């Protein structure tokens, strides 16, 4: 009888743990999805920041860079 | 004395107890029988119905919409991406205090409060308030906890480079369907899959064991283009500058790799932003480089010259009399911009003499001219993977009159698309081999694994390599001193090219005197061409010659693109290459 009761409690504990961990996994999965969405937003933002229009504007106005003249190009053999 | 009396009482009660016990026994038997019968009824007869009812309480239907795939440029930089967004909707019947709700929401979402109030008081069961709302606005609206207002997750298409290659890529609608350009043509590959699944939920409605479904990827496939974002930017910037400077109504610039047929840029002016495509007129959405035919004008002279040389009838030094600027052809008179006497074939192309061109065309005959133009792909689709490609117009040689043949030889009475013109020119740059223009490099699945790759495809040999080199030498002369395309010269590189100035046909069907299409087509470097560039400007205002209007834009695009592609300037490699590539030498090799 004692063995049966211990087995019953053991089984119940396992089931409770299983369900609890199931909820934790579901929560973490949702969190993962949120982070993936955020990552996607950041990727779009990065693509926007690296757009040639913006890069050229910053290079020309803030950094005073110019396209090299062919005479300035040194070919390394 | 008491005992016998008690015994009598017991004897009298015994049958009654017995009856009671029987009654209780029967009652309990009937009760258990009824319970058993009910159990059998519930499990056997009504079993499926109850099972369904129970399932409805712990199972939930979940619809998953996969994201639309990404469009990348040739270096895997994002050109079109799908992101998750939230749209705000309302159930008007459930909205408490519509005027106050309208005022509050309108302030956050920057909407008209009167119109919003009308929506919230309408008799419809569901109304959209705003689609694709910015995340901070969603958070602010959620914080208000307004009754009858719902936040619906959706997906939005974002074009991070805004106007860049907009006409080529096209756009997709709010329902995720491709509506224009490559978004339309490759809609089946790009669109995400919609999957309906059943997930287990607990008493609080929380999903349980649903992570497998959530983690599964139902996104659409990706598209990798041959377009290079930076070259596209170079082309669009130079085109816009040329169009604004010359007051042109529109323009097209195309950059192509002659060896593979890869399109590096297809630029259109004026631009439109696909992120808000509905703010622009439909005419701006069209990929005109593919869909719109036009009369090319003098750029066609190079193909006429190619036919003359490849057929062996002419050499670059064959001379023709150019009638001092006026040549009568039946009832029509052909004019040159400047009067010329005797000119060689090279000079006819260099100075862009219409009369000389007609004379050359007459010497080779209509059949050779027609076969040559067909060989270069005029009058048929190139097969580029873009929707709505035009075939252009090249009527059968059997229907040509003498004036038709003359006009076609210098680019009138024939219409071509920009993609046909650049593909044909690329064949000259590619030693006479016509390549199919390639815009899509590969299709990949949602994990980036290759599904299909599109390799460069040779269409046919149009002219011999020797003839192609001869034509290159002739085209090189156009950009040297005295030629019509000197403004197309590029520092550090030799350039082969041809100018084009074509009168447009007005509403009455006659050539308009003040409406032109100015163009320049060319490639560089001459000896081993790496890029072919075409610039077309529609209805420039003050100047209209291709050499003055389109050639400078060509020069800018070619210069920056060659620099970007790390093509070593020829001066650094072989300072005297130009001398080596003299016409005499080419003519000699031809012999």
Image (cartoon, rainbow, N blue to C red):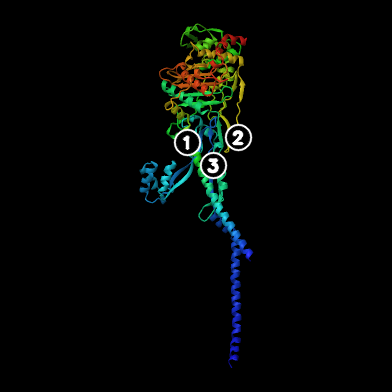
Q: Is residue B170 above or below residue A17?
A: above
The quadrant of the rendering that contains the N terminus of chain B is bottom right
- Residue B66's tag is 3
Q: Residues within 10 Å of mark 3 (few under 14, many from 20)?
A: some
Residue B182, image x and y in percent?
53, 32
Q: Residue at x 51, y 22 (%)?
A: B563
Real-space Cα separation, disc 1 to disc 3, in angstroms: 21 Å
What element does badge 3 sit on? loop
Real-space Cα separation, disc 2 to disc 1, in angstroms: 26 Å
Q: Which residue is mark 2?
A: B450
Q: Is residue A75 above or below residue B177?
A: above
Tell which subunit mark 2 falls on. B
Q: Which residue is mark 1?
A: A45
Is tag 2's residue or tag 3's residue first in the polypeptide sequence? Answer: 3
Could you say which quadrant of the image residue B16 lies in?
bottom right
What element does badge 1 sit on? helix
Determine contact: label 2, label 1, CB under 8 Å: no
Tell which subunit mark 1 falls on. A
In the displayed structure image, the side of residue B90 where residue B418 appears, left or right: right
Determine contact: label 2, label 3, CB under 8 Å: no
Q: Residue at x 56, y 48 (%)?
A: B211
Circle nearer the viewer, 2 or 1: 1
In the displayed structure image, the side of residue B337 where residue B75 appears, left or right: right
Instruction: Judge by depth and name the residue closer to the eye, A44 or B360.
Output: A44
The lab-note entry on whether marks 1 and 3 share a chain reads no
Residue B151, image x and y in percent?
45, 46
Circle nearer the viewer, 1 or 3: 1
């Amino acid at each position: 009888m004692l063995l049966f009761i211990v087995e019953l409690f053991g089984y119940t504990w396992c089931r409770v743990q299983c369900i609890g961990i199931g909820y934790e996994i579901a929560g973490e999965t949702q969190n993962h999805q949120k982070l993936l969405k955020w990552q996607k937003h950041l990727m779009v933002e990065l693509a926007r920041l690296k757009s040639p229009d913006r890069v050229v504007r910053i290079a020309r106005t803030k950094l005073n860079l110019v396209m090299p003249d062919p005479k300035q190009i040194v070919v390394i053999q | 004395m008491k005992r016998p009396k008690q015994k009598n009482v017991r004897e009298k009660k015994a049958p009654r107890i017995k009856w009671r016990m029987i009654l209780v026994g029967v009652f309990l038997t009937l009760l258990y029988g009824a319970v058993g019968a009910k159990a059998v009824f519930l499990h056997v007869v009504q079993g499926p119905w109850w099972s369904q009812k129970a399932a409805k309480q712990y199972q939930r239907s979940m619809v998953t919409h996969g994201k639309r795939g990404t469009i990348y440029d040739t270096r895997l930089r994002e050109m079109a991406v799908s992101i998750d967004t939230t749209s705000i909707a309302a159930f008007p019947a459930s909205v408490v205090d519509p005027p106050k709700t309208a005022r509050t929401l309108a302030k956050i979402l920057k909407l008209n409060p009167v119109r919003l109030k009308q929506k919230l008081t309408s008799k419809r069961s569901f109304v959209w308030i705003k689609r694709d709302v910015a995340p901070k606005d969603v958070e602010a609206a959620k914080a208000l906890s307004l009754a009858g207002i719902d936040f619906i997750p959706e997906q939005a298409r974002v074009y991070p480079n805004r106007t860049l290659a907009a006409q080529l890529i096209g756009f997709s609608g709010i329902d995720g369907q491709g509506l224009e350009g490559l978004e339309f043509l490759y809609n089946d590959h790009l669109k995400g899959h919609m999957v309906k699944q059943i997930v287990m939920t607990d008493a609080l409605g929380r999903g349980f064991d649903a992570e497998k479904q959530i983690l599964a990827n139902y996104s659409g496939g990706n598209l990798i283009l041959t377009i290079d974002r930076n070259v596209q930017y170079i082309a669009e910037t130079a085109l816009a500058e040329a169009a604004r400077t010359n007051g042109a109504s529109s323009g097209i610039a195309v950059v192509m790799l002659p060896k593979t047929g890869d399109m590096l840029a297809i630029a259109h002016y004026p631009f439109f932003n696909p992120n808000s495509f509905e703010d622009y007129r439909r005419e701006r959405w069209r990929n005109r480089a593919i869909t719109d035919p036009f009369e090319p004008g003098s750029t066609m002279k190079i193909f006429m010259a190619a036919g003359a040389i490849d057929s062996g009838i002419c050499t670059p030094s064959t001379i023709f009399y150019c009638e001092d600027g006026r040549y009568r052809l039946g009832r029509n008179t052909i004019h040159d911009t400047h009067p010329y006497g005797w000119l060689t074939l090279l000079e006819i192309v260099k100075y862009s003499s219409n009369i000389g061109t007609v004379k050359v065309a007459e010497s080779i005959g209509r059949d050779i001219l027609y076969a040559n133009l067909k060989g270069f792909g005029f009058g048929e689709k190139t097969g580029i993977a873009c929707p709505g490609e035009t075939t252009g117009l090249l009527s059968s040689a059997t229907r040509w009159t003498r004036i038709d043949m003359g006009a076609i030889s210098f680019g009138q009475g024939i219409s071509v698309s920009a993609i046909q013109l650049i593909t044909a020119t690329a064949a000259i740059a590619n030693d006479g081999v016509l390549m199919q223009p390639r815009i899509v490099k590969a299709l990949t699945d949602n994990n980036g694994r290759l599904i299909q790759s599109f390799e460069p495809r040779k269409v046919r040999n149009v002219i011999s390599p020797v003839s192609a080199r001869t034509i290159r030498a002739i085209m090189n002369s156009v950009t040297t001193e005295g030629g019509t395309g000197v403004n197309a010269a590029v520092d550090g590189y030799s350039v082969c090219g041809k100018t084009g100035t074509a009168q447009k046909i007005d509403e009455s069907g006659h050539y308009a005197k003040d409406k032109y299409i100015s163009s320049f087509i060319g490639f560089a470097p001459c000896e081993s061409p790496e890029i072919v560039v075409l610039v077309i400007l529609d209805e420039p205002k003050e100047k209209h010659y291709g050499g003055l209007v389109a050639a400078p834009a060509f020069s800018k695009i070619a210069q920056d693109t060659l620099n970007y592609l790390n093509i070593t300037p020829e001066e650094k490699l072989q300072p005297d290459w130009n001398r080596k590539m003299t016409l005499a030498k080419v003519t000699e090799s031809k012999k």
